[in-house]
Amino acid sequence: MVLARPQPGPTMEPDVLESYKDRFGRHLSQTVPGRKELVVAEARDCTIKSADGRLFLDFISGIAVANVGHSHPEVVAAVQAQMASHAHVNVYGRFVLPAQVEIAERIAGVAPGDLDVAYLTSTGTEAIEGALKLARKHTGRKRFVAFERGFHGRTFGALSVSWKPQYRQPFEPLLDGVDFVPFDDLDAVARAVSDDTAAVIVEPIQGEGGVRVPSDGFLPGLRDICTDRGALLITDEVQGAMGRTGHWFSFELWGIVPDIVVMAKAFGGGLPLGAFVSTPEIFSTFLDPPLSHLTTFGGNPVSCAAAVAAFDIIERDGLLAAAETKGADLKRRLELTREQFPEFISDVRGRGLWLAIDLPPDLTMPIVHEMESRGVIVGSMLNSEGTVRIAPPLIVAEAEMDVFIGVLRASLRAAATGKLQG
Ligand SMILES: Cc1ncc(COP(=O)(O)O)c(C=O)c1O
């Protein structure tokens, strides 16, 4: 299947376009104030086209989703074939659905140790809920240890282990018994983990916390503490899996094996799909009582078919290695940009194609908007003021990285001369 790349030029009459913006504001629940300006017409590879005819380079992959690019032709073909065969049939786990088997086997094939069993969900937050339930049920313990700046989703359980007080307080009471400790501080973890801790939940590299990479001893130290105290180690790979760091899972950077791994976002190749993955022994706990966990749409066969296609593309096209080499190159060019603009860029961080820069907090959104007005989409982060996320699809071309660096530098020059317009 060949899909044409988006070409510039409007796809809607101006009055139709404005009417979509009005109707969006009227009928869709708003969680961020302000009128939305970009009406999407198409998205392919690294490019998003707006209905008024502009092309944008997506340098955040739809927030960690489009690792194989938007609407990859092989994902589209897999979705069409699966839909033509069957989509939803019954609730999760009632019948054998080959697409679910295929994707679960693929995860087991790349996950280390005995991480051989997946429970498929629709989203990341739903997979986190399942992982927390599994940890409590398996250990018979109640408490969780989570990290400052950590983010795991917005449902009650996931919110309970997410750090930012502004997002938590309006919805309290949340789960009892969650202790937050500083990220990358093993002494604090050792003090917090007790004989009533069901699990420590960690993003091996904190995503919304600002792409923070811990020191080398942190993940192995966490593994040891959990093993010694009988608590499970849950790694949240919702942003970090599917090649983002040059590995299938970011925890592989430190050679550890967690007890439960949570994935979503890029997992579904662009469609909604999540999973919590663990050992046969830990999962056996969900059989008692029978039906102790269920979902209707989790592991929808169409999403599973898209995920299998995404696995194939990543493997065949060498996207793990590509993420590492392209990421190193992009990071080097960001460091050079930092040397050019030391008054603006205070830090460059990340691994693989999962990068971030720190800007003065009052300039972050103006620079994000400036870059968008110049055709490059980047974004801010939920739990890290002043940080700009930079995480293009793993298929990003060198020429697209050149455009990104050019637009970043032009935007910083505009800031330096008081000419920001975005
Ligand atoms: C690390 C992490 N965990 C969990 C979630 C929740 O995933 P979802 O938005 O698919 O529910 C997110 C979403 O951004 C995330 O970044």
Image (cartoon, rainbow, N blue to C red):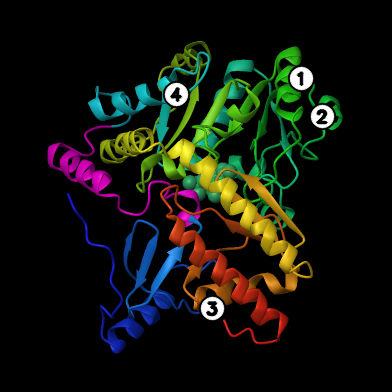
**Picture residue at 49% right of the left edge, 67% below the top:** 403
Q: Would you name the residue on which mark 2 appears? A: 186
Mark with earlier residue (4, 1): 4
Residue type beneath disc 3: Gly
Q: Would you name the residue on which mark 3 appears? A: 34
Q: Secondary structure at mark 3?
A: loop
Cβ–Cβ below 8 Å for labels 3 and 2? no
Res. 107 in view: yes
Numbered-mark total = 4
Mark 4 is surrounded, within 10 Å at the Cα level, by few (under 14), some (14 to 19) or many (20 or more) other residues, namely few
Marks 3 and 1, how far apart at CA: 46 Å
Q: Would you name the residue on which mark 4 appears? A: 110
Point out the frontmost of discs 4 and 1: 4
Point out the frontmost of discs 2 and 4: 4
Q: Which mark is residue 225?
A: 1
Mark with earlier residue (3, 2): 3
Q: Secondary structure at mark 1?
A: helix
Q: Quadrant of the C terminus?
A: bottom right
Answer above or below: position of 92 versus 228: below
Cβ–Cβ below 8 Å for labels 4 and 1? no
